[in-house]
Image: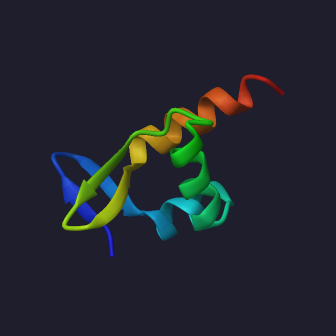
């Protein structure tokens, strides 16, 4: 399920992981170790990522290749 908030979409950790081609566990590790600055939102005990943040992350990652 994807929530819509003021023109931006929120993805669950599972959806965000699929979007990035990673596992949900990888995103959890990245967050706990501060490996990447992926901002997340905690809402009702669940973790969400903004689609625009994920797109910006992908954009920054592809600049290095």
* Residue 57 x/y as whole percent: 56, 35
Residue in view at x 48 percent, y 39 percent: 38
Residue at image position (57%, 66%) is 24
Q: Which quadrant of the view contains residue 18?
A: bottom right
Q: Residue furthest front?
A: 33
Left/right of residue 30 with respect to residue 11 in the rendered view: right
Q: Quadrant of the C terminus?
A: top right
Q: Give the vertical position of 56 relative to 16 (above or below).
A: above
Horizontal placement of 19 versus 1: left or right? right
Q: Residue at x 51, y 46 (%)?
A: 31
In x, y percent, where is residue 2?
A: 32, 68
Q: Along the horizontal axis of the image, is 22 left or right of 33?
A: right
Location of residue 3 with respect to 33 vertically, above or below: below
* Residue 43 occupies quadrant: bottom left
Residue 12, position as x, y percentages in the image: 40, 65
Give the residue furthest to the left: 6
Q: Image point 32% across, 56% down: which residue?
A: 10
Query: The N terminus appears in which quarter of the rendering?
Result: bottom left
Q: How many marks?
A: 0
Q: Position of residue 46 (x, y in %)?
A: 31, 67
In the depicted view, which residue is nearer to us: 43 or 59? 43
Q: Is residue 64 above or below residue 4?
A: above
- Extreme residue toward the right, this view: 65
Q: Residue furthest top?
A: 63
């Amino acid at each position: 399920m994807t929530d819509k908030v003021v023109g931006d979409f929120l993805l669950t950790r599972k959806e965000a992981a699929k979007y990035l081609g990673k596992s949900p566990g990888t995103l959890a590790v990245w967050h706990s170790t501060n490996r990447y600055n992926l901002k997340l939102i905690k809402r009702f005990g669940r973790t969400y990522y903004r689609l625009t943040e994920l797109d910006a992350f992908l954009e920054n990652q592809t600049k290095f290749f």
